[in-house]
Image (cartoon, rainbow, N blue to C red):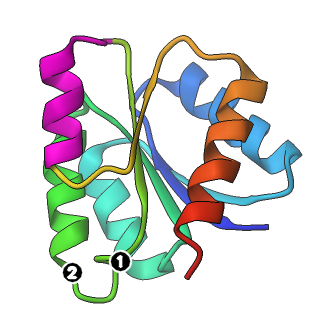
Amino acid sequence: MAKIVIAEDEPDIRELIAFTLRFAGHEVIAGTNGEEGYLLAKKERPDLVMLDVRMPKLTGYEACKRIKAEPELAHTPVIFLSAKGQDSEIEQGLAAGAEEYLLKPFAPDQLVERVKNVLAKYKK
């Protein structure tokens, strides 16, 4: 079981992700924008952070850069969630420090599998 912080401004998608990950046995703390995602990551020290790309207050990219700039969070893996799949978007996400880029819509089992793979690869 891992502690996962998610930040997603779309309530339905946020609930789906949280439900799916909780069902898979993870502890999930959810925020509604990039700033909340960053602050929750600082407070909770999660095993993984999932960020939507386009959010109010801070974009996922900005939140990721702030998370990676914190010494105690620098090694925490980040997965971006986005409906935009252009190569330039994916490159921007990886350049911001993300380990994975998951395109919406995704199947729940695909989400669980990607999370499992990232957690196995970046075990603390």
Kindly give the residue lying farthest to the bottom in the view shown. 72
| Residue at the image point whose x is 25% and y is 42% from the top | 60
The quadrant the C terminus occupies is bottom right
| Residue at the image point whose x is 53% and y is 72% from the top | 46
Secondary structure found at label 2: loop
Q: Does residue 12 appear left or right of residue 79 in this picture? A: right
Q: Position of residue 54 (x, y in %)?
A: 24, 27
- How many marks the image carries: the answer is 2
Quote the CA–CA distance across marks 2 and 1. 8 Å
Q: Residue 93 or 61: which is nearer the viewer?
A: 93
- Which span of residues is magenta-colored? 84-95
Amino acid beneath label 2: Glu
Secondary structure found at label 1: helix
Residue 58 visible in image: no
Q: Does residue 25 appear left or right of residue 111 in this picture? A: right
Q: Position of residue 68 (x, y in %)?
A: 22, 69
**Pointers 2 and 1 in contact (CB under 8 A)?**
yes
Q: Position of residue 94 (x, y in %)?
A: 23, 43
- Locate residue 37: give its quadrant: bottom left
Q: Does residue 107 appear left or right of residue 87 in this picture? A: right
Q: Residue 64 or 10: which is nearer the viewer?
A: 64
User: Residue at label 2?
Assistant: 70
Say above or below: 73 vs 54: below
| Residue at the image point whose x is 33% and y is 56% from the top | 36
- Locate residue 47: give its quadrant: bottom right
User: Residue at label 1?
Assistant: 42
Q: Position of residue 12 (x, y in %)?
A: 59, 20
10 Å neighbourhood of mark 1: few (<14), some, or many (≥20)?
Answer: some
